[in-house]
Image (cartoon, rainbow, N blue to C red):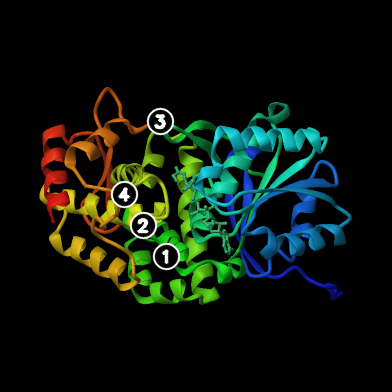
Amino acid sequence: MNTLIDDPLSPAELIQLDLGQRSYEIRVGEGLVHDAGRRLRPVLAQPRVIVITDKTVAPLYLAELQDSLKREGIDCDHLVLPAGEQTKSFDHLRDLADGLLDQSVERGTMLVALGGGVIGDITGFAAGILLRGLDYVQIPTTLLAQVDSSVGGKTGINTRRGKNLVGLFHQPRLVLADVQTLDTLDSRQLRAGYAEVVKYGLIDDPDFFAWLELNGAAVCGGDHAAQTHAVVTSCKAKAAIVAADEREAGQRALLNLGHTFGHALEAETGYGDALLHGEAVAIGMVMAFDLSVRLGLCPAGDLERLRRHLNGVGMPTRLPTVQGVNWSADALMDHMSRDKKVRDGRMTFVLARGIGQSFISRDVDAPTVHTFLSDAVSV
Ligand code: NAD
Ligand code: GLY
């Protein structure tokens, strides 16, 4: 007998992140905000959610999400936070926690993070600590959040000592990555997220990197099919790494390719608009490949291929000129020595033997790094 499907859910790619009882689905496609109510229903303990979003995303997608939840008989309250990195702070966490408690949040209430990595990180953290642990769902609306921050359960806020220094691992119950939401994203933000896409090719997937060389312009130009393929491939790669090493005891650190340098650049430029996280990661990945070439580990041609690709899609690959910043090797070394990944005083780098052949190294000594940085700042 044929079964007629009334109003089928829009098709979406499925990636499963396997973590035993904490396993969850990542769905990627178009129209997922519209369908969110039906997709959320199976993971709700009670027919009530509280959506956390920001002032930029709320006017774009909150009403559509609320309508979708209402159609399924799900009660929906919401809280709107300011947009931007400054929101990942103790002050905003306190306001968020008070706001949720004012709305009589219960253990069975699902939090829904609708926004970029900032909203995802602070919502996940609030979910982890409120009432000793609430469930939450990620609906990422930036490319960076769709390919990286919404998956894997790292949550947290920044402190005056640095980024993401207060937080916990708390996995979401579901991730819905709707590539249609990328249509409204500023092109600079889209390209910044693209750096994290390139990262997966560089880590261990040279075929994906070659695909990006051909299709990166389409991904950054708003082609939904290309974006879906890029998000699915990235999420598959991240899901496999997180499933094998949830708490970053080993190979999850590969996801930090470009980040040891990148975080130092962000710290020096004040985590603001002058240099977005993804832009710092793009420059950081080039620096990691450059260092690998200088150490005789990686062919120079692969460094040039990476530079060409990033430049081709409009990404920076060298230290930018930033008002008020006088790049210095000492200052960058200082930031890098405070990195969360420093072990017994040794810095951790992700280096490469070529595109798709990255590995973790604690063998680069401080004088070598300093000489490398001195050259980088003098170019
Ligand atoms: P973001 O959340 O600040 O979003 C960037 C800007 O885009 C914001 O102004 C936001 O309001 C706006 N925006 C979001 N979606 C939009 C849309 N669809 N249309 C128009 N505007 C939209 O920044 P981000 O780049 O998404 O995330 C960066 C954060 O993610 C950083 O705090 C970083 O530390 C964190 N991060 C976390 C992880 C993790 O594993 N948890 C991984 C990588 C990065
Ligand atoms: N963004 C790095 C990680 O999730 O481990």
**Percent coordinates x, y for residue 199 in the rendering:** 36, 56
Which label belongs to residue 258? 4
- Quadrant (top left/top right/bottom left/bottom right) for the N terminus: bottom right
Mark 1 and mark 3 lie on one chain; the one further toward the N terminus is 3
Which label belongs to residue 279? 2
* CA distance for labels 1 and 4: 16 Å
217 or 99: which is nearer to us? 99
- Residue 340, compared with residue 376, is above or below; it is above
- Give the residue drawn at x 23%, y 38%: 331
The answer to whether any part of residue 105 appears in the image is: no
Label 2 vs label 3, nearer the camera: 3
Side of 247 where 323 appears, left or right: left
Q: Residues within 10 Å of mark 3 (few under 14, many from 20)?
A: few
Considering every residue shown, the one lying at the far top of the view is 344
Q: Dot 1 corresponds to which residue?
A: 191
Q: Residues within 10 Å of mark 4 (few under 14, many from 20)?
A: many
Side of 133 where 344 appears, left or right: left
Q: What secondary structure is marked by label 3?
A: loop
Mark 1 and mark 2 lie on one chain; the one further toward the N terminus is 1
**Percent coordinates x, y for residue 140 in the rendering:** 59, 56
- Residue 191, compared with residue 341, is above or below; it is below
Q: Is the CB of the residue bearing disc 4 within 8 angstroms of ligand 2?
A: no
* CA distance for labels 1 and 3: 28 Å
Which label belongs to residue 161? 3
Q: What secondary structure is marked by label 1?
A: helix
Kindly identify the amino acid type of the residue bearing the numbered disc 2: Glu
Side of 371 where 308 appears, left or right: right
